[in-house]
Amino acid sequence: MVEESNEERKVNLDLLDEVREEVRITVEALKRRVEYKHSSKLRPRQFQVADLVMRKAHPYLLENKLSQVD
């Protein structure tokens, strides 16, 4: 009984590395699919010096995002 239990534990520990590797591969494939899906929806843009862009407002500098900074 104890020997069977020890033997099963050893087998499970041996299989654990294989299961972890399969999960790692699956997670990596999922990350790549998500990245591809996200990247395919982006439109590349190039900004010039005089272009107007919306700046992120810093709470310690601005009252709100439309406030003027001198």
Image: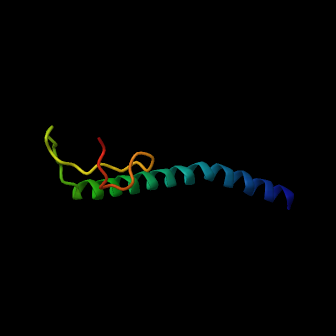
> In the image shown, does 29 or 70 lie closer to the viewer?
70
Nearer to us in this view, 43 or 36: 43
Location of the N terminus (image quadrant) = bottom right
Q: Nearer the viewer, residue 28 or 51?
A: 51
Looking at this rendering, what residue extends furthest in the top direction?
Answer: 49
Q: Is residue 34 left or right of residue 41?
A: right
The image shows residue 40 at horizontal and vertical percentages of 23, 56
The C terminus sits in image quarter = top left
Image coords of residue 9 (percent x, y): 74, 55
In this picture, is 41 found above or below 68? below
Residue sticking out furthest to the right? 2
Which residue is drawn at the image coordinates 13% and 41% (left, top)?
50
Query: Most extreme residue toward the bottom, as rendered?
Result: 1
Residue 56, horizontal then vertical, whole percent: 34, 50
Q: Quadrant of residue 12?
A: bottom right
**Which residue is at a point 43% across and 50% down the rendered structure image?**
59
Image point (40%, 57%), residue name: 30
**Horizontal side, residue 18 vs residue 54: left or right:** right
Q: Position of residue 18 (x, y in %)?
A: 56, 50
Residue depicted at x 42% and y 51% = 28
